[in-house]
Amino acid sequence: MKSIHVVALFALSAGYAAASEVSVPMNTVNAQGTVKAVGSIKISESPDGLVFTPVLEGLPAGEHGFHLHENPSCDAKEKDGKMTPALAAGGHYDPKATKKHAGPEGSGHLGDLPKLVVDANGKAAESVTASRLKMEDIKGRALVIHAGGDNYSDEPEPLGGGKGRIACGIIGN
């Protein structure tokens, strides 16, 4: 009888572990929409916040702005008369309407994540942690990787100076 309880407890904890982890397929994006798969980002809970673990390849080397965006879409959308990659993802997730980019530890957008680093071979594998996020915050949103780095400020350029959106993935509900 005791072994049945242990098996049941194990099954329940295995189900919980699966629910506390999400894998997000990532694709490059352009003005026509999504282009090609570049890997995935695993999101898991930790005592320090959400951990984002990329398994990506085929991206430009260097630091890239990395954000949780408000809408579950990677579609291109028109802005100022031209199609803009992944613009349907909306802005950085900002449930408190702070309207400021202050980095992952700041008091601005909740969707401001630590920079994503891509090595000289175009691969990203280094995990980053977002201490202010919980699993319930990310459901039904999009992850976006930007062309440039991120200075975690709105100065001298808005939104950390990350420029265009180069990759995107939709987080399921």
Image (cartoon, helix red, strand yellow):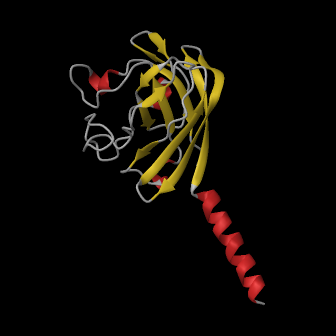
Q: Residue furthest left?
A: 155
Q: Position of residue 157 (x, y in %)?
A: 26, 19
Q: Position of residue 59 (x, y in %)?
A: 55, 20
- The residue at the point 37 percent across, 50 percent down is 131
- Viewer-side residue, 61 vs 9: 61
Q: Residue furthest bottom?
A: 1
- The residue at the point 61 percent across, 58 percent down is 19
Q: Is residue 49 above or below residue 121?
A: below
Using the rendered view, name the quadrant where residue 70 is placed: top left
- The residue at the point 25 percent across, 29 percent down is 153
Q: Position of residue 104 (x, y in %)?
A: 33, 41
- Viewer-side residue, 171 vs 20: 20
Using the rendered view, name the quadrant where residue 112 is placed: top left
> In the rendered picture of this protein, how many numbered marks are placed on residues?
0
Q: Is residue 41 above or below residue 46?
A: above
Q: Residue furthest top?
A: 81
Q: Is residue 101 above or below residue 81?
A: below
38 sits left or right of 44 in the view? right
Q: Quadrant of the N terminus?
A: bottom right
23 sits left or right of 11 in the view? left
Using the rendered view, name the quadrant where residue 158 is placed: top left
Q: Position of residue 143 (x, y in %)?
A: 50, 35
92 sits left or right of 77 in the view? left
